[in-house]
Image (cartoon, grey):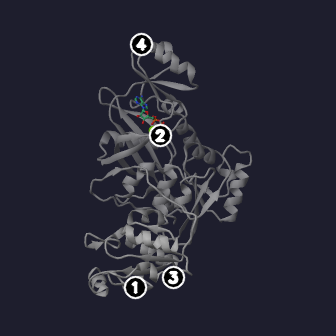
Amino acid sequence: METKNVLIFPCGSEIGLEINNALKYSKNINIYGGSTVSDHGRFVYSNYVSIPSINDDDFISSLNEVIKKFSIDYIFPAHDSVVLLMSLQAKKINAQIITSDSKTTDICRSKGKTYDFFKEEDFIPFVYKNVDEVNDFPVFLKPDVGQGSKGIALAGNQNQLNYIYTNNDNMLILEYLPGKEFTIDCFTDRLGELRFVGMRERRRIKSGISVNSVNLLVDTRVRDIAEKINNKLNFRGVWFFQLKEDNQGSLKLLEISPRIAGTMGLYRNKGVNLPLLSLFDRMNLDIDIVENGYNIEIDRAFINRFSMDFEYQRVYLDFDDSITLNGKVNPYVMMYIYQCNAKGIEVILITKHEKDINDTLNELKIDKQLFKNIIHLTKESQKHLYIDKDIKSIFIDDSFSERKEVYREHNIPVFDIDAIESLIDWRV
Ligand SMILES: Nc1ncnc2c1ncn2[C@@H]1O[C@H](COP(=O)(O)OP(=O)(O)O)[C@@H](O)[C@H]1O
Ligand SMILES: [Mg+2]
C-alpha cells in the first residue's frame, strides 16, 4: 500500500487525541495534527501544523495550502462544527474529508433538525414547541446546536423554565429523561451497509465526556434504532448516537454525530479501530471486523505531558531501585532507555551494585548493549567524579544524596524516578 498522509483537525480535542491513538502505529499512514490554538496536540503529534480558525475568511485557501505542502490525502475533522463546515465545503477542499455527506452532517449538527427528521419514530423524545405548552415538570433544556453538554439545564418549574428559555438563544425544551445513558458506536461502509454496532454505557460523565464506560451487548431494540438511523441518513465510515432512558425505561435519542467519539477507544481495545476502518473504507478497500469477545471497561482521567527547555546528549543512570523495582525490571524506565537509544542519546549505567552487574543484567534479561558504558563503583566512591563535564548530560538516581552531590558538583539536571515521566517523548 502506498503511504497516505492524514490530517487531523483540530488535533488536540479529545476526538483528535483518540484519532492519534488509533492511527499512530499504522503502517503506511502518516499523521499530521492541525490546530488553531496551541493545545495538547503539540505533545502527541510529531507533525504539528498551525491552521487558521474556521471562522477566518481564508480558512479554506489556507487549508488547501497545508494540503499541498504536506500532500495530505485525507482529513479527519475532530470537532462538530469542523465536521459540518468541511462536509459543506468538501468540494473546495483538495483532500477527502472523512465524514458523511453534507445533508447528514447538517441534520446531525442540529438536535432540532435531528428530532424532526425522525419525528415518526418512537425513539424520539417529546419536544415542546414553546414554554406555554409545558405543564409537567421537570423539563430538560439544551441548545439546538451544541456539544460537550454545554448550556444544558434542568427546569423544575415554570419560573425556572421561563428564565432559562429567555436568557439563552435557540434552546430546545424536552421531556426529562432520568435513566441510564448509552453511546452506540457505529460504522457504515461505502455501500451504505451498517457493519458495526457497539453499545456502551456512559457510567460517569465529566465535562460532557464519558470518563467511565463499559461495553454492553447490543439488543435487538438498539440494533433496530441503529438500522433505522442508518437507512434514513447517508453515513460513510464511523458515526455514533446517544440514547437515554425515559421514566418508563424506554430508550430515547439524544443526538446523532457523524464522527469519532473520544471514548471509542473502548472498542479500539476490543479490536475495532473505527478511525482506521474509516480510512480503509475511503481507500475503497473491503473492510473486515474482528471484535474480541471479552468485556472491557474504560476509565479516563487527565494525563500529563511535558516539554522542557534544555537538551542533552547523555544520561547517567543508576541501577538499583532505579532500573529495578522490587527486584524486577521497572518497565517504564526501560521504555525511557529504549527511547534514548532510538534518539541517539547515550545512556551510561553508573552503579554501586553489590554483585556482578553483568550477571544481574543477564538475570533480569537486560541487554548490556543498551548502555554505552557501565561504570561499576564501590560503595565508598563518588559518582560525580565519573561525570564528563564536556558532554551535555542529565543524571537519574533514586538516591537524594547522590543527586544532591551531582547537582552541586556539575549543576546538571538531576531526576528521581518519579520525574522520568517528564523525559518521555510521546510524539509519534
Ligand atoms: N432530555 C434529556 N433529559 C435528561 N438529560 C438529557 C436530555 N438530553 C440531554 N441530556 C443530558 O445532556 C447531555 C448532553 O446532551 P446531548 O444531547 O448529548 O448533547 P451534546 O453532547 O451535544 O452536548 C447528555 O449527555 C445527557 O446527560
Ligand atoms: Mg452528547
| Residues under numbered marks 3 and 4 in contact, where contact means CB atoms less than 8 Å apart | no
Question: What is the C-alpha distance between the residues marked 4 and 2?
Answer: 28 Å
Mark 2 within 8 Å of ligand 1, using the beta carbon? no
Of the two numbered discs 1 and 2 on the same chain, state the one appearing first in sequence.
2
| Residues under numbered marks 2 and 3 in contact, where contact means CB atoms less than 8 Å apart | no
- Label 1 is placed on what type of residue? Ile
- Label 4 is placed on what type of residue? Asn
| Residues under numbered marks 4 and 2 in contact, where contact means CB atoms less than 8 Å apart | no
Q: Nearer the viewer, residue 132 or 356?
A: 356
Question: What is the C-alpha distance between the residues marked 3 and 4?
Answer: 80 Å
State whether residue 276 appears in this view.
Answer: no
Residue 168 x %, y %: 56, 24
In this view, 369 is above or below 263: below
**Residue at the disc numbered 1:** 375
**Residue at the disc numbered 2:** 256
**Residue at the disc numbered 4:** 135
Question: What is the C-alpha distance between the residues marked 1 and 4?
Answer: 80 Å
